[in-house]
Image (cartoon, rainbow, N blue to C red):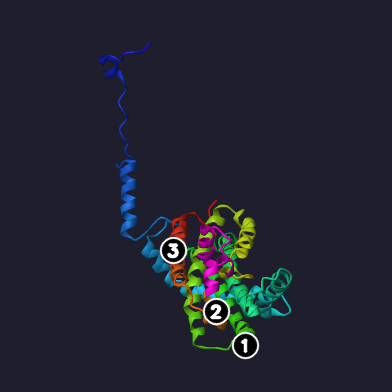
Amino acid sequence: MSQTITPAAQQAAPAPAPATPGPDGNTGQDRETGLSALAARHGLTVSGARPGLLEYVRRLWSRRHFITAFATARLTAQYSQAKLGQIWQIMTPLLNATVYYFIFGVLLRTKDGVPDFVPFLVTGVFIWTFTSSSVTAGTRAISGNLGLVRALHFPRAALPIALALQQLQQLLFSMGALAVILVCFGQYPGVSWLLAVPALTLQALFSTGLSMIVARLAAKTPDIAQLTPFILRTWMYMSGVMWSVDKVVSGDRLPRFVAVALECNPAAVYIDLMRFALIDSFTADRLPPHVWAVALGWAVLVGAGGFLFFWKAEEEYGRG
């Protein structure tokens, strides 16, 4: 049965207790408002609070020297325990290219119909290594530097950016070896080599944004770091590192949507741009008009989007 509350019962119900003033005569709410005003007047903010986007960018720019020094120090220390030292920066991608040559080029015959296959393969391996290493480093950007994150107050995006910069420095260091290999196989420097600069710039923006996306995901879910190598290996096999995307797509053996996905694959696009810049047999052909547009689109989308995605979780890094 429902009960009816009579006016007498309503009058008998106790009224909410009024705020009790403290010893200074102010209520708790008044004191909280007063403290907030005092903090604002003296420029104090909540510790670890996420700043606005423009302020965040300004703070990040003010740490540019730290980012550069951090990247250079990690690059120097990367092979400090090895007897060959920094030579491994060149040897690692070269050994990978040698293995891929015998497995894919010789055994699986992917070199058939691909002119200048060795320059084709080595260029693909070097450029792919830059992106894959940036992603792998991003998975450890926060978890691998928790002491730094918890001890110092700085824009956390400095860490994945520094690690991506480290991989770019390593790539630039290795480009000298790539140039020597190209010359040994008859690919001499020309005007088209200048196109490598914008191509690498766009790839660097893309790889940095991707590193920041992975850094946020791995900071929240550490298992991402264990899954990343399998994803990267699958991505590599789909990116035309060891085989020609154009040759497969032009064969009309694939559904149209699969062909479009392969052609717009960002890793394949940046690899093709570098091959177009450095290898005569690619430069001689007209580059499809979509390649530069797709490369720019991926750089802006992933670069800017990755930065915003990472910034949104600024307050969460290093906690928990």
Q: Nearer the viewer, residue 35 or 180?
A: 180
The 10 Å Cα crowd at callout 2, few under 14, some 14 to 19, many 20 or more, is: some
170 w.r.t. 51: above or below: below
Amino acid on which the number 2 mark rests in the picture: Phe
Q: Which residue is mark 1?
A: 186
Which residue is at the front of the view, 34 or 289? 289
Q: Along the horizontal axis of the image, is 40 left or right of 81?
A: left
| Identity, as a three-letter code, of the amino acid under mark 3 | Leu
Please give the label number shown on residue 282.
2
Circles 2 and 3 in contact, beta carbons < 8 Å? no
In the image, residue 261 lies in the stretch drawn in magenta? yes
Discs 2/3, front? 2
Q: CA distance from mark 2 to mark 3?
A: 27 Å
Q: Residues within 10 Å of mark 3 (few under 14, many from 20)?
A: some
- State whether residue 268 appears in this view: yes
**Image quarter hosting the N terminus:** top left
Q: Position of residue 153 (x, y in %)?
A: 48, 63
The residue positioned farthest toward the top in the image shown:
1
Determine whether 33 is above or below 143 in the image: above
Number of numbered tags placed on the structure image: 3
> Could you tell me how far apart the alpha carbons at marks 1 and 3 are, in whole angstroms?
37 Å
Please state the extent of the stretch shown in magenta in the rendering: 247-272
Check disc 2 and report its element: helix, strand or loop: helix
Picture disc at residue 301: 3
Is residue 70 visible to us here?
A: no
Disc with the residue nearer the chain's start (2 vs 3): 2
- Residue displayed at 43% across by 66% down: 297
Relative vertical location of residue 177 with respect to residue 111 in this rendering, above or below: below
